[in-house]
Amino acid sequence: MAKSKLNELYDPENFRKTGLEIVNFLADYLHKSYLNELPTNSYKEPEEMLQSWRQFLNESHSSSNYYKKVVNESIHLHNPNYIGHQVGVTAPISALGGLISDLLSNGMAIYEMGSVSNALEHLAIEILNKSVGFENGGGFMTSGGTLANLTALLTARAAKVGDNIWENGYESKKYGIMVSSQAHYCIDRAARIMGLGSDGIIKLPVDQSFKVDNQRIEEEYFRAKEKGIQIFAIVASSCSTSTGSYDDITFFAEFAKKHEIWFHVDGAHGAAVTFSEKYKYLVEGINLADSAIIDCHKMFMTPTITTAVLYKNKLDSNKTFRQKAEYLFDESENFDWYNSGKRTFECTKLMMSIKFMSIVQQYGVQVFEENIDTLYDNTRVFAAIIRSNPNFELALKPQANIVCFRYQPDNISIEDLNDFNSAIRQRILEDGQHYIVQTLLDRQVYLRATIMNPKTAVEHFQSLLDKIVQIAQTLKLPLK
Ligand SMILES: *Cc1c(COP(=O)(O)O)cnc(C)c1O
């Protein structure tokens, strides 16, 4: 008797029936999202959300109703009014690849537990290396930009400091890395995880366009050196998170070469431009880096989470994790590309390459170029609209697809201006038709939009600005 539930659980016909219902529902959902017939977001306070789910799960519902509630109450990236965080808008074909990955669950820890995904991953890395210009490159996919940066920095440490730290821990010497003060916080976190401490993260000052000020790099390097810190890596942001500013890669590469340190490019968001004839100038010189990362779940439209770590010299990637798991890998020091688990944090890993390759196999890499050009072009259109509107101030000319701006009423103090723009962003969140975020630049609050959806067009930008003006008119100073 007890077994009947298990039989039902694995029944292929139940899968077919519910699966077809779900795919039908999701296709309708896509239509509605594109047409903005659903709000971008149905914001609920955390306790209210929790309560609603507690109640739902206590009642009896079909699985399709359960899935519908999940979808309806989530934030909708396919709606063109979603211009918030820099998460890619999933290509439906890629989500189907994800479904197959989930059902097969080939964990990839060793070759035969993921022979297809290892081969596909190798080919995906070849495509990305070619685009970046790593001619004899290597690499793998891993679970997100955060883990990818940590992995690359561990490789950097192994390559430039030697493996004594892996064996003995830090003895008395201090080590450090250099990175933009505008870098994604995960670099800081990676450095701390590696035991470098606050002193080991040299945060480089930026110029007015929020990219690292090249003229200040060397002085920061020598200041650290005087404190007894051995710098082993410099990290370029391509691009930075808040403003989408690209560091000067060629300059960083020359600096790294001169001081014999590792050069890593955090290209989680913006290194995708290597696929665009029009915008690849933004990462000129990236082929000179020792390593780079790219999040496919940002500009390449795969679902979260699919990140590539790329190495200029594929043998470097063998240095990251020195301990041998003899029961998993044979002893050979050969570069057995098909045992990617040797080089990744993960033991069991998702079949990420399938999500990337589902797009490439059907549409070719040209679709990446089309996506990047559309998003970057549209961002420039949005910036021009903001600039031409006297109610708004553009923080800086966008380099990527990220726009920072604020509403600027007349005669207002800086403190009130900050509160005013925070209040606007909160009202937009609660209203649910649009989705944007906010950021702090030099301690001032700016509204921040990342144009991730190729269907976001002038009419959506205009309706957002109209909404902001409308909200602003209902706000009274001083704000509580
Ligand atoms: C998004 C991003 C990250 C973090 O990547 P996750 O995939 O969210 O872990 C790191 N660096 C930069 C520059 C990013 O844009």
Image (cartoon, helix red, strand yellow):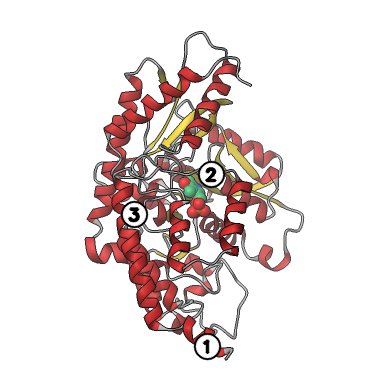
Residue 16 pos. (x, y %): 35, 77
Cα–Cα span, label 3 and label 2: 33 Å
Quarter-of-image position of residue 195: bottom right
Reading the chain from its start, which is encountered first: label 3 or label 2?
A: 3
Q: In terms of depth relative to the viewer, which is nearer, 118 or 12?
A: 12
Q: Residue furthest top?
A: 411
Q: Is mark 2 within 8 Å of ligand 1?
A: yes
Reading the chain from its start, which is encountered first: label 1 or label 3?
A: 1
Which residue is painted at 49% across and 36% down in the image?
Answer: 429
Q: Residues within 10 Å of mark 3 (few under 14, many from 20)?
A: many
Residue 184 pos. (x, y %): 53, 44
Q: Amino acid at mark 3?
A: Tyr
Q: Is mark 1 within 8 Å of ligand 1?
A: no
Reading the chain from its start, which is encountered first: label 1 or label 2?
A: 1
**Location of residue 427 with respect to 102 vertically, above or below:** above
Which residue is painted at 64% across and 47% down in the image?
Answer: 47
**Location of residue 267 with respect to 246 vertically, above or below:** below
Mark 1 touches mark 3? (CB < 8 Å): no
Q: Nearer the viewer, mark 1 or mark 2?
A: 1
Quarter-of-image position of residue 65: bottom left
Q: Residue furthest right?
A: 172
Q: Residues within 10 Å of mark 2 (few under 14, many from 20)?
A: some
Residue placed under numbered mark 1 in the picture: 4
Q: In terms of depth relative to the viewer, which is nearer, 382 or 158?
A: 382
Q: Amino acid at mark 2?
A: His
Q: Is residue 358 visible?
A: yes
Residue 29 image label: 3
Q: Amino acid at mark 1?
A: Ser
Q: In terms of depth relative to the viewer, which is nearer, 124 or 2?
A: 2
Q: Is residue 309 visible?
A: no
Residue 95 pos. (x, y %): 36, 63
Residue placed under numbered mark 2 in the picture: 184
